Image (cartoon, grey):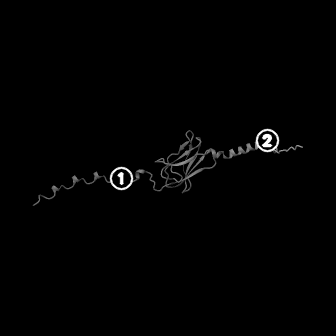
Amino acid sequence: MTSITTVDRGTKLTPTRRAMAVAGVATLGFSLVLSIGPVLAASGTVKIHDAVTDADLGNDPHVCAFYAAFYASNPVEAGSWQLIDWDGDRATVVSGAYDTTGDGVDVTPDMAPEPGQYRFEWLPAGDRNTKNKMLWVDPDCSDDPSDAADPSEDANPSESANPSESANPSENAGPSGD
C-alpha cells in the first residue's frame, strides 16, 4: 500500500484579503512619508562665519562681526531668520529672510551687535519648529578697527627737535683762553 503525505503550505490569501493587505501596507507607507517629509524637506544647515576672514567659527562661535550662511542639500530652501538678544529681554535685534534657490547657499548681511550672548534662529518655510545656534559677541570687540593703537600714530621722529636747531657750539663761549 502506498501512503500519500500531505504538506500544509499555509492558508492562501483570498483576493479580498490580498487587497486588504496591500491597502494596509500602502497606508502605512504613506503615513511614514507624511510624518518624516518635513524633516527631509528642511535638511540644510547654518554656519556662523567671521565677517572679516570668512572663516567658519564652528559650534561655539565667539564673534565680533559675523554673518550666517545657509547651506541646503536640496538647493531650494527658504525661510526666515532672527537674531535674539539672549542676555537681555529676548528682543529681536535684527531679522530677515533667506532663499537658497539656485546654488543652495544664501547669507545674511554682516552683523556686529553689542557684546553679549545671542541666539540665531531660523525657520524653514513649511516647518513648525525653529532651529537655532547660540553665539557670543566678545566684550573686547571694537566697533571700529581703526580705534586700535596704530604704531604710525606714535611720535613722528621728524617732529622731534631738529639737531640743526639746537644751540650752535660756535655761538656759546668765545675763543678759549680768554
Nearer the observer: mark 2 or 1; the answer is 2
- Determine crowd level at label 2: few under 14, some 14-19, many 20+ residues with C-alpha closer than 10 A: few
Residue type at mark 2 is: Arg
- Determine crowd level at label 1: few under 14, some 14-19, many 20+ residues with C-alpha closer than 10 A: few
Is residue 116 depicted above or below 96 in this figure? Answer: below
Residue type at mark 1 is: Pro
Q: Secondary structure at mark 1?
A: helix
163 to the left or right of 47: left
Q: Position of residue 154 (x, y in %)?
A: 33, 54
Residue 178 seen in the figure: no
Q: Which residue is mark 1?
A: 151
Outermost residue toward the bottom? 178
Determine the residue positioned at 40% across, 52% down.
147
- The image quadrant where one finds the C terminus is bottom left
Q: Tell me which corner region of the image, top left, top right, bottom left or bottom right, holds residue 76.
A: top right
Q: Position of residue 111 (x, y in %)?
A: 50, 49
Which comes before the other along the chain, label 2 or label 1? Answer: 2
Q: Secondary structure at mark 2?
A: helix
- The image quadrant where one finds the N terminus is top right
Residue 123 seen in the figure: yes
Depth check, front residue: 115 or 100: 100
Is residue 20 depicted above or below 154 in this figure? Answer: above
Q: Which residue is mark 2?
A: 18
Q: Position of residue 35 (x, y in %)?
A: 68, 47
Distance Cα–Cα, label 2 vs label 1: 86 Å
